[in-house]
Image: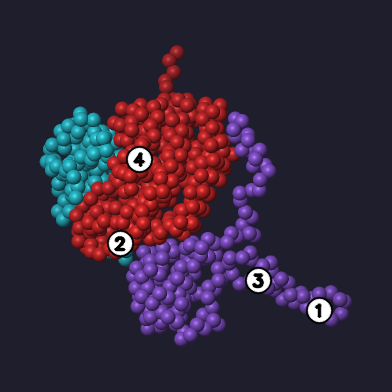
Chain colours: A cyan, B red, C purple
Amino acid sequence: MIENIETVELKQILAAANRYHEQGCRFVTITSCAQNDGFDLIYSFDKDLHLFNFRVSVSKDEVVPSLSPVYLAAAFVENEIKELFGIRFEGLAVDYGGRFVISENTPQSPFGCGVILEKKGGGGK
Amino acid sequence: MKREQEHTILPFGPQHPVLPEPLQLKLVLDDEKVVEALPGIGYVHRGLEALVEKKDYIQSVYVVERICGICSVIHAQSYCQGIEDLLHLEIPQRAEYLRVIWAELHRIHSHLLFLGLMADALGFEALFMQAWRLRESILDILEKTTGHRVMVSINCVGGTRRDLTPELIAELLKTVEELEKGLSPLEKTFEKDHTVAARLRGVGVLAGDEALGLGAVGPVLRASGIAQDMRMTGYSAYKSLDFEPVVLRDGDSFARTMLRIKEIYQSAGLIRRAAEKLPEGPFAVKVTGNPDGETIQRLEQPRGEVFYYIKGNGTKNLARLRIRTPTFAHIPALIKMLPGSQLSDVPVIILSIDPCVSCTER
Amino acid sequence: MFDFISVALKNLFIRPATRNYPKTVREPFAGQRGHIENRISACIFCGICSRKCPVSAIKIERDKRTWAIDRFQCIVCGECAASCPKKCLSVLPAYTAPATHKTVDVSVYAQEENEAENPPFHPRTEPAAKPVLRAVPSIKNNEPDIAEEPVRQPARHSGT
């Protein structure tokens, strides 16, 4: 059970992040989870040791606005999510172009929904 | 005559004598002064978050504790706490206190490792050797109580795998007391030595509000004046151990080093109080069922706050495990601390955040 | 500065913190987890240890009644020993000796503990003996005639 979690639409992500920023919250992380037909992004913020979250549902083709104008730290997490899940972000302050965490030999978007990693005899782990 | 400013781009790493793990920094230099820094990671990515989905949730404790060699028992503790939360399992009080004792022992040996590496970065090899000599006594007591020196495998879902007998507790307390005595001259050296102060004071300053805005955690945040320590929330047995965080104001590398030394003494005190208050009873409960639902756990590792998100779907494999380690949170802080410093201060600044790159990349 | 000089001076006169490994090897501590042993005469080849192993180090063939463990894959966690229904697996304190290539130790079922066929694994816990040259008494000249290769201490029980 996660406490203090609200659901937010894709268009209101930046507005929600600004709201948390004005109240003095520290950015913690973005968690991405593959669902059957898309992804679930959970943004977590901390204020005085209490965690506040908001959840966004994203489909495979939607472009997510980046939080980097508000929180610079978000750019790195978004780079990692971009590479591991294949979600597209726009407005990244620092963009590694797909080479932040994985290398050329790794299959693309290894955690993305619908990707089967067991095909070539367990390769891609 | 106007001379155009020429900048040199210097790749610092990924292999460097001062770095414990591969981490690349592209430094843009103007003569010897750093103008810009861009970190690059990805040299030790193992995809452990995907591996956990292939193994069942009891075997995954061994995967999770192998993410990092230095904070390994706290990774296992976070994972076990999360699974116990999903299974609605109450573990015995004795197990909570035992977990705290082993976690604080790990904190001591991690901070001693950091002190050795910092002394090595300054060129003070003798101090490095002394710090690691003290660390050996902790590794020996870990081996006597759990069976292994580094990857101790002592936490399991439902409690701990072994108990501490009164003889082992007495030996543990004696080791901790001797460590405090042995640490005292090293602390005075770090505090008062002229060369150490010249290399550490005023280097890599991070102001409090800047640190908070960049998402810094743990000792980096506490050395800049902000009192945030996950142990204040009172998870596990910390609620009954009178925990107060250590806070310093200066925000430079010297403050970060001294804070970690003070935390060693604090951990020694916590171990003594936990050993005194250790309740009788069983040290593990039987585990049945499969985890279902989602949970977030935040614990305090030696390097800062670690964030665990666990999602179960009712089967014995987990649906998702997401880990955000403290060093990952310090990468943006590194981008802000490096510009303006000299090239020779770059190793000191990188080491002062205590990087653990295998945690960062999992 | 003077705080550290006192430490440095003390270190000149006390004995070193390191030991002369591999000449002197420390006695293993009592609860140390060094390697896994199977009392093969009691094993029923149920396969539970193989399924519980987090790193798949144990391979069992029921029809051939063999129990094989890859010593260098094993992380000595003790899950196999904890879950064995016959309690024939045990975790012993001595570490696996370093080797130049990885081997798998195979134990074949034998009715009683037959030491000659299935000698128990003896990792090196005492210092390795120096090679001894076998001197053959000479026929003439009173000179020892070194006839054979030096006798070496067997380092480990070899498997496949």
The amino acid marked with disc number 2 is Val
Mark 3 surroundings: few (<14), some (14-19) or many (≥20) residues within 10 A: few
| Vertical side of C29 occupied by C143: above or below | below
User: What residue sits 37% from the left and 73% below the top?
Assistant: C84
In front: label 2 or label 3: 2
In the rendered structure, are the residues bearing label 2 and label 3 in contact, judged by CB atoms less than 8 Å apart?
no
Left or right of A19? Residue C5 is right
- Look at the numbered disc 3 and give the secondary structure of its residue: loop
User: How far is mark 4 from mark 3, CA to CA?
Assistant: 60 Å
Whole-Å distance between the Cαs marked 1 and 3? 21 Å
The residue that label 1 is drawn on is C137
The residues bearing labels 2 and 4 have C-alpha atoms spaced at a distance of: 27 Å
Q: Which residue is mark 4?
A: B242
Q: Badge 2 is on which residue?
A: B285
Report the residue marked by disc 3.
C152
Q: What amino acid is at disc 4?
A: Asp
Query: Which chain hosts label 4?
Result: B
**Mark 4, other Cα within 10 Å: few <14 / some 14–19 / many ≥20:** few
**Label 1's element?**
loop
Q: Is residue B256 left or right of residue C115?
A: left
Residues at marks 4 and 3 touching, judged by CB atoms closer than 8 Å: no
Q: Secondary structure at mark 2?
A: loop
Q: Please tell me whether mark 4 or mark 3 is closer to you in this view.
A: 4
- Per the model, the C-alpha gap separating discs 2 and 3 is 50 Å
Q: Nearer the viewer, residue B171 or C36?
A: B171
Q: What chain is tagged by disc 1?
A: C
Q: Are marks 2 and 1 on the same chain?
A: no
Q: Are marks 2 and 4 on the same chain?
A: yes
Residue B54: x, y in percent? 29, 61
Farthest bottom residue in view: C111
